[in-house]
Image (cartoon, grey):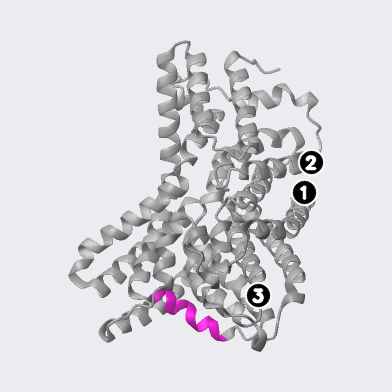
């Protein structure tokens, strides 16, 4: 039996409070900050220790997660520089020619959204897709609800839940579970594809009867203009994507060049990362190395695009793009730091530095100790544990971001895995599926799903309701697959 102290009890109480607050669809930053302070106070025996703990927890989380902020910053900055020269819209326009009817439109929307969202995340990508591809799909006969479902399920669901290229989500899950990022990323990719294919297939079956012939397809230009429903972070991208800019003939060649160069560069990045997994001598791109690789490529492309388009003004213009990227990154991920700090406190790998434990002394593992102490009352059943983590992830996602719950599901995965004999990375990937598919923008209307609904001209609540059955079917089947295969 593990030694359970007052600090352990407080950690358990705060964890339960966090879960209850998530169920109430509220933010959990304040409960985690207060909980971190109280645990530090109780562990050290004085309030000064509590003040130091709450600061150290956030500092530790920031150090561990700053690579996430950088990769988001560079990718958003690159997209902003492409937007200035019109290369972002030029990349998408050729795809419009493929949309000849509603059935093909659904497939094209899903595939293009998935690929772009893998590299740039759905939030900055959706306005671009919403301004250029969704109207074309609706003109081809695809119902607006069908277009919205295709974009949401492929982008906010399938691409974001795996996050295989930028690896923000797998890194958050892996840190909490105490496993390698690559282990979670590889399994999350497979589970996301299973969930995505099933949910997209279900969505297509739901809307196929409403698909009209292109000649009869409604194509109101204003169907994409519902700015009152768009999140503030998307407005800049939406305005730029929907504004027809006049590019000087001298600069048009650069727009065309980067419209081809950036997709080819990203394709090359993906090919190199895949080949490296087969021992090609190209080096390893596991975990943070993969993010560093794509981030470095994005930086060079950013410098080149700014330089050729704005010439000497690039020295100042790049500052604007990087600032835009950092603002986006901190708005998207800022609340995750205190939440991660609290759950890092429950992990022995981080608790020593957070609690200022003396060198050589054993650091406490609050969450693991609690789970081990109640092991006798936890059913040692893989199905129970896996679906429990899936449900916990879905609950955590109710907060509306999708990523805030990953430190929780990751930490629980690391603590519960030994009790049922499962790989922590498998449980972490399952929890990640639940959290991101729920809060990332497919199942709840108060998430980034609002932006997709706004561009399609449909109700966000109706869209979430339509997504529910296909997504839940996909999550259940992918979880069963994970249990049986891994």
Residue at 41%, 45% in the rendered image: 66
The percent coordinates of residue 167 (x first, y second) are 52, 54
Earlier-in-chain disc, 1 versus 2: 2
Q: Is 265 on the left-hand or right-hand side of 402?
A: left
* Distance Cα–Cα, label 3 vs label 2: 37 Å
- Decide: few, some or many residues near mark 2? Use Cα within 10 Å; few <14, some 14-19, many ≥20: some
Check if residue 450 falls in the magenta segment: no
The percent coordinates of residue 70 (x first, y second) are 39, 52
Residue assigned mark 3: 106
Viewer-proximal residue among 445 and 189 = 445
Task: Kindly state the secondary structure of the residue where label 2 is placed.
Answer: helix
* Distance Cα–Cα, label 1 vs label 3: 31 Å
* Circles 1, 2 touching at the beta carbon (< 8 Å): yes
Please determine whether, in this image, residue 455 is positioned above or below residue 374: below
* Circles 1, 3 touching at the beta carbon (< 8 Å): no
Residue assigned mark 2: 382
Residue assigned mark 1: 483
Does residue 275 appear in this view? yes
- Name the image quarter holding residue 103: bottom right
Earlier-in-chain disc, 1 versus 3: 3
For the N terminus, the quadrant is top right
- Name the image quarter holding residue 150: bottom right
* Distance Cα–Cα, label 1 vs label 2: 7 Å
């Amino acid at each position: 039996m593990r030694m359970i102290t007052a600090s352990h009890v407080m950690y358990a109480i705060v964890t339960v409070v966090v879960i209850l607050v998530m169920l109430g669809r509220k933010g959990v930053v304040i409960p985690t900050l207060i909980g971190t302070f109280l645990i530090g106070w109780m562990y050290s025996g004085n309030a000064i220790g509590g003040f130091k703990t709450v600061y150290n927890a956030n500092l530790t989380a920031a150090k561990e997660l700053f690579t996430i902020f950088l990769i988001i910053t560079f990718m958003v900055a690159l997209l902003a520089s492409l937007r200035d020269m019109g290369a972002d819209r030029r990349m998408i326009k050729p795809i419009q020619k493929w949309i000849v009817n509603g059935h093909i439109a659904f497939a094209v929307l899903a595939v293009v959204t998935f690929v772009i969202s893998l590299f740039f995340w759905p939030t900055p990508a959706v306005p671009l897709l919403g301004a250029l591809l969704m109207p074309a799909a609706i003109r081809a006969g695809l119902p607006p609800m069908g277009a919205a479902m295709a974009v949401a399920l492929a982008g906010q669901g399938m691409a974001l839940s795996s996050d295989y290229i930028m690896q923000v989500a797998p890194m958050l899950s892996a840190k909490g579970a105490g496993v390698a990022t690559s282990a979670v990323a590889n399994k999350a990719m497979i589970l996301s594809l299973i969930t995505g294919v099933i949910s997209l297939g279900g969505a297509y079956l739901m809307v196929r009867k409403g698909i009209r012939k292109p000649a009869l397809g409604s194509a109101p230009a204003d169907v994409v203009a519902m700015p009152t429903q768009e999140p503030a972070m998307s407005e800049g991208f939406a305005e730029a994507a929907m504004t027809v800019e006049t590019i000087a003939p001298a600069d048009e060649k650069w727009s065309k060049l980067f419209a081809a160069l950036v997709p080819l560069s990203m394709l090359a990045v993906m090919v190199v990362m895949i080949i490296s997994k087969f021992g090609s001598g190209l080096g390893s791109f596991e975990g943070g190395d993969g993010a560093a690789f794509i981030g470095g490529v994005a930086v060079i492309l950013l410098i080149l695009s700014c330089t050729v388009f704005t010439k000497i003004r690039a020295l100042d213009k790049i500052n604007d793009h990087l600032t835009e990227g950092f603002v986006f990154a901190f708005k998207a991920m800022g609340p995750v730091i205190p939440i991660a700090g609290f759950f890092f406190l429950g992990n022995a790998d981080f608790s020593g530095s957070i609690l200022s434990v003396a060198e050589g002394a054993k650091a406490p593992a609050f969450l693991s100790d609690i789970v081990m102490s109640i092991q006798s009352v936890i059913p040692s059943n893989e199905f129970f544990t896996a679906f429990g983590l899936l449900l916990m992830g879905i609950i955590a996602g109710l907060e509306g971001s999708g990523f805030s719950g990953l430190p929780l599901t990751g930490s629980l995965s690391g603590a519960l895995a030994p009790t049922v004999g499962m790989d922590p990375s498998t449980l972490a990937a399952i929890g990640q599926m639940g959290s991101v598919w729920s809060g990332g923008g497919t199942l709840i209307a108060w998430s980034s799903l609002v932006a997709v609904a706004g561009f399609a001209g449909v109700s966000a609540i109706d869209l979430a309701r339509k997504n529910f059955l296909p997504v839940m079917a996909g999550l259940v089947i992918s979880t069963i697959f994970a249990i049986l295969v891994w």
